[in-house]
Amino acid sequence: MVTTMSEMSELPVNAPGPSTAPVRRASARRARRRMTLYGWLFIGPLILGILAFQGIPVVVSIYTSFTNWDGITTPKFLGLGNYVRMFTKDPQYWGTLLNTIEFTVGVIPLTIIGALLLAVLCNGRGKVSNAVFRTAYFTPYVTSIVAIGLVWSQLFTPSGVLNQLLAKIGISGPSWLTDVHWAMPAVILVSAWQAIGYPMVIFLAGLQNIPESLHEAAKVDGASSWNRFLRITLPLLTPQIFFVLITQIISSFQVFALIFVMTKGGPGTATTVYIYYLYQNGFTFGDLGFASAMAWVLFFIIGLVTFAQLRLQRRWVFYND
Amino acid sequence: MTRGSSTMSRRTLLTTSGLGAAALALSSCAKGTGSAGAAAGGSSNIVTSASWEDGVGDLLKGAIADAWSKKSGKKLQAQASVSFDDYQTRFRTLLAGGSPPDVMRLNDDFLGEISGKKLSKDLAPYFQKSGLNKDDFFPIFTWSDLPSGQRGLVVAQQVRVIYYNKTMFQKEGVPLPPTDWVADHWTWDDFLSAAKALTKGTDQYGAAVYSDTGYEEIWSRNNGGEGTYSPDGKKFTLADPKGVEAIQWVADLTNKHHVQPKWGDVTPDQAVERMFVAGKLAMMLATSSDIAYYTENVKDFEWDLAPIPAKVHQYQQGSVVLYIIPEKGKNPDAAWDYLNFAIGPEGGKFIAEAGVSVPVNKQAAQSLKSPGKYPAHIDLLSSGADHNKIVNFTTAGSAAVSLFRPQLQRVYTGDLTAAKALGGIRAQVEQALAAG
Amino acid sequence: MSSEAQLAPPKAIQTATAADAHAARFIAYGARWIFMLVLAIAFATPLLWMLATSLKSETDLSAHTLSLIPQHFLWSNYAQAFRAISPFLWNSVQLAVINVVGVLVISSIAAYAFARLEFAGRDVAFFLVLATAIIPGIVLLIPQYIIFQRIGWVDTQLPLWVPRVMTPVFGTFLLRQAFMGLPRELDDAAKIDGVSIFGIYWRILLPQIRPAIAAVAVFTFIESWNDLFGPLIFINSTNLATLPLALAQFSGQYFSTTTLLMAASAISILPVIVVFLLAQRYFVQGIAASGLR
C-alpha cells in the first residue's frame, strides 16, 4: 500500500520512524475517511441542489417522454411512440438536427478563435485602454436578447446597413433573414457577435495566471511574439480553452432565444434549430411528451460529445500541477 | 500571505456582503402582493387575471376594472403583464400548476385545444343566469361556441381594414376609396390600378397586403373560395384553385406589378407600420389595433380607413379579444361578474371610446370614437364587424400553419408559384389536420 | 531557445538594425491599435444604433430608420422609460446580489473539492454535475413549476435564486479549472505550516484565483439580471417582477414603442456595464503567477 504525498502530509510533522508502519496504515485510512468526509461536505450543497431541483423534474420529464402529456391533462402512455415518430415519421426532425449542427460548426470556431484574439489584444499594458476595449467587446453579451434581435433585424434588411456597406465594396448583398441560404449565416454572425464576450473574459482571466517571467525569459532568448503565443500562452491556456469548448458546444446545441426573437425559425425552416422546434412542440402544439423525448435525445447527443472531450483532454490540456 | 490591514478590510468586505446577501435572501421568501390577497382566507372579492400587453388588455385591467369595482365592490388583481410571445409559455404553466388565475386572456389559436380538453368553464349556464340575449352582440360572439361548449368569451374584436394615406391619394389624383362596405369602384382591379398609380419606383409603394397573414383567409374567401380550411377543419382548402389564385394575385403585387414592397423589407418588426408613418406607403392591410399607433405617430399627412377590396365577396377577417375562466379557477362566479360587466354596455363603452377595438356589445359599439383627429371613418369598423368571416376551426391550426406558411414565403420571393407551393404541401397539412 | 555566443556586429550596423527594429515595433503597435479600434467600432455599431433609436421619436424612427443620428435628441424618452421600469429595478438588484454571493460561495468550495481533494465518488459526482448542464432546461419548466406550486414557492422570489445558487454548474466547472491551474507546491507548503483543509481553500488558494472569481461573479450577475424565463413562469404579482419582464410594457401584440424599448434596454444594460468595469480590474496578475517561479 503506497501512501501518496497528500496522505503523508496529513500526518503530524514529527511522525515516528518505519517501525510504526501498522499505526501509519491505520491513520492513513483515517485520513482517507476524513478526506472523503470533507470532499462530500464541500460538494454537498451542490449535489443536494442538483438532486432537489433537477432530480424529480428529470424523472418526471423522462417519464413524460413516453406519454403524450400536454402539461395539463392526464397523460396517455405511448411507450416508444414519441421516439419512433421522431426518428421515422416527423418531417422536420432531422432537418432541425442538421440545422443545429450547422449552427454549432459555424459558431464555435468564430467565437473561440475570435475571443482568443480579443483577449490577447485586450491584455496590453494600458489599463484604461484595456478597460475600454474589453467593455466594447463585452457589451453585446450583456444586452437583452430582445434588443439584439430588433437591432440586427433592422441591420439585415435588404436595404439595411450591412448591404449598404457591402454595396460600397461592390457586393450586392442578399436579403439575409428572408433568404433560405443566408439566414443561418446571419444568425451565426449575430450569435458569435453576442457570445464572444464570454470566452473572452474566461481567456482574460486565464491569461493572468501565465507568469510574466516566462514571457520575459523567452523574450531574452529572442522569441518572437507569435512564437511566445504559440509556445507559452496557448499551452498554458488549454484548461480555459477546454472549459470554453465544452460550455460553448453545450450552449450552441441549445441555442433558442436568438431564433425566437429574430427569425422564429424562418425563412421556412432554415433557422429552425433543435430547441426551437422542441419549444414549438411543447408549448405551441401542446405536445410536451414529444418535446421531452426530443430533449432526452439531445441530452444523449451532447453527453456523448462532452464525454469524448473529457476523454481526449489528457492529450492536449496542460494543467499546472 | 497578506496580513494586517488588507486582511481586515477583506474580512469586513466579506462579512458585510455575506450578511447583506443573507438578509436579502430572507426577505425573498415574501409572497407577492398579488397572492397575498387570495391567500388571505380565499377572499371571493378578488378576481385575479392574466393577460399580455396591449391596448384592450390595459383597459380591461384599468378603467374597466375600476368601474366594475365601484359597481360591485369587488376588485380585480392583474398579474404581471408579459409580451405576447412570452405569454404563450406562461399560460400553459399557469394552467398546469392547478391554481390558475380566475380570468385569463387566451390567444384564439388555442381555443380549439383548451375547449376540447375542457380546461375552461362552459359559459352557457352563466349566460342563462345573467339573462344574456345573443342578439345584443355581434355575430362573432358565437365564434367561441364549439361542440365542447362555449368555453371562451369574445370581449372585443379587431376588424381588418385598409389604411390609406389620404394626402397621397389626393396628390396623385386617385379617387378615394368608398366610405362603407360597398364594392363601388373598389374591386380587386380598382385596388390594383390605385396601387399602380401610387407607386413610384422603390421610394413609394402602392400597397402592402401580405404583411398581415390575415389576408390569406380574406383574399381566398373574397375570391369565392372556402377560406383556409374546410368547415369541418379537416381539409386544406387554401390549396383549392380559388385559394391558389388569390394567393398568387397578392404575390404578383410584388413580383409582377411591383406595387408591393419586397418580402424581405416587410418582415422586420413593424417595418410596414414605419413605412406608412414615413409616408412611403399608400395602402396597407392591418387590424384596427394599429389605430392607436398611427394616431400617435403620423404627423405629416391625413389618413383614413377603407373597406377591404371586393371580388365575389367583401369579407374581412377580424381577430378576437378572447378571455376564459379556467376550470380550476378558485373564483368563477366573481370572474363571470367581471366579464359580464366587460361585455355589457358600460364596459364596452370604455373600449369604444378609446377607439382601440370594437366591443362585442352592439350598443356599446355605437359610441365608437376616433382616438384623435383620424381616422374620420372609424364607423367602418362597426360595419366591418358585420362582414366578418373568421378562419374555420381546426384542432391542429398551429401545426398546419408551421407547415404551409414557410412555403407561402417562397411564393412571395418569387421562388415558387402558389400552385406549386400549396399543392406541394397539401398532403402534409391534411395529415396534420387529421392527426390533431 | 538557449542563446548562442555570437560575434557582436560592428556598432554602426547595430544602431541601424536597432532603428529598424524600433520602426517595426512602432508600426506593429499602430497597426494593432487601428485593428482594435475598427473591431471595437464594428462591435459597437449595433449598440450605437440602439442608442440612436432610443433618442428618436417614433416618427423620426420611421422616416430615418437606419440613421445613427436622431433629428432631435429626445432625452425625455429616457425619463419616460425610467419611470416605467424603476419599480422593477430593486427586485433585479436584490436577486442579483443574492445570486452572485450564493453562487460564489457554493461553487468555489465545491470546485476546490473537485480540484484538490481526493475522495470516493469524486469523478462520478463531477460527471453528474456536468450532466446537469446538458439537460435542456425548458422541458423541466412545467414539472418544476408544479413542484414549486405544491410547496408554495410560486409568486415568491425563491425560485429565482435558490435553484441557481444550489446548482452553479458552470461556476463550479470554471473554478475547478482555475484551481487545477495552481501549482501543488502552494498546498504542500501550507500543509507543512499546519493549515487545515478548509484553510488551504480559504486563505491560500482562493485569493490566487481572483480573476476566475471575478469572471464567475460577472456571469452570474448577468444571468440573474437578464433572466426572463424564471420571472415569466414563477412570478405572478407585479411587485415582484424584474427588469426583463418590465421591457414587455413596450412590446404590444401588434406594435411596439421601439424607441422607448431601446431606451429601457439601454438603462438596464448600464448596471451590468458598471459591474463589468469593476470586475475586470481583477483581471490582473495573481501572486502565484509572478512569485513562485
Image (tube, coloured by chain):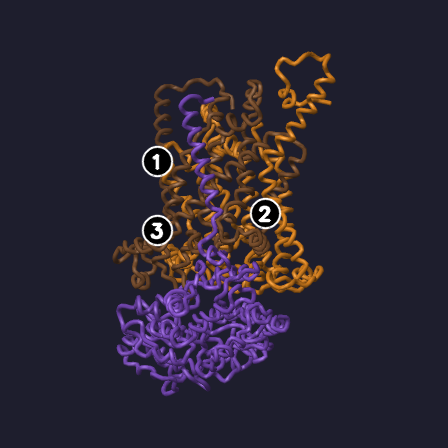
Q: Nearer the viewer, mark 1 or mark 2?
A: 2
Query: Separation of disc 1 and disc 3 at Cα?
Result: 21 Å
Contact, CB < 8 Å: mark 1 with mark 3? no
Q: Are marks 2 and 3 on the same chain?
A: no
Q: Nearer the viewer, mark 2 or mark 3?
A: 2
Mark 1, secondary structure of its residue: helix
Q: Chain of mark 3?
A: C
Instruction: Inspect the image, locate mark 1, and give the three-letter code of the amino acid beneath it.
Output: Val
Label 3: few (<14), some (14–19) or many (≥20) C-alpha neighbours in 10 Å: some
Image x and y of residue B335, in percent = 48, 68
Please state if C250 lies on the left or on the right of A59 as rendered: left
Image x and y of residue A134, in percent = 40, 40
Q: Residue at x 53, y 51 (%)?
A: C153
Q: Chain of mark 2?
A: A
Please state if B243 lies on the left or on the right of B63 as rendered: right
Instruction: Inspect the image, locate mark 3, and give the three-letter code of the amino acid beneath it.
Output: Leu
Chain seen in purple: B
Chain seen in orange: A
Question: Which numbered disc covers residue C48?
Answer: 3
Q: Chain of mark 1?
A: A
Q: Are marks 1 and 2 on the same chain?
A: yes
Chain seen in brown: C
Count every numbered label the image shows and give the total.
3
Image x and y of residue B241, in percent = 54, 81
Label 2: few (<14), some (14–19) or many (≥20) C-alpha neighbours in 10 Å: many
Does residue B424 sit above or below C43 in this rendering? below
Mark 2, secondary structure of its residue: helix
Residue beneath disc 2: A53
Query: Separation of disc 1 and disc 2 at Cα?
Result: 43 Å
Contact, CB < 8 Å: mark 1 with mark 2? no
Residue beneath disc 1: A128
Instruction: Inspect the image, locate mark 2, and give the three-letter code of the amino acid beneath it.
Output: Phe
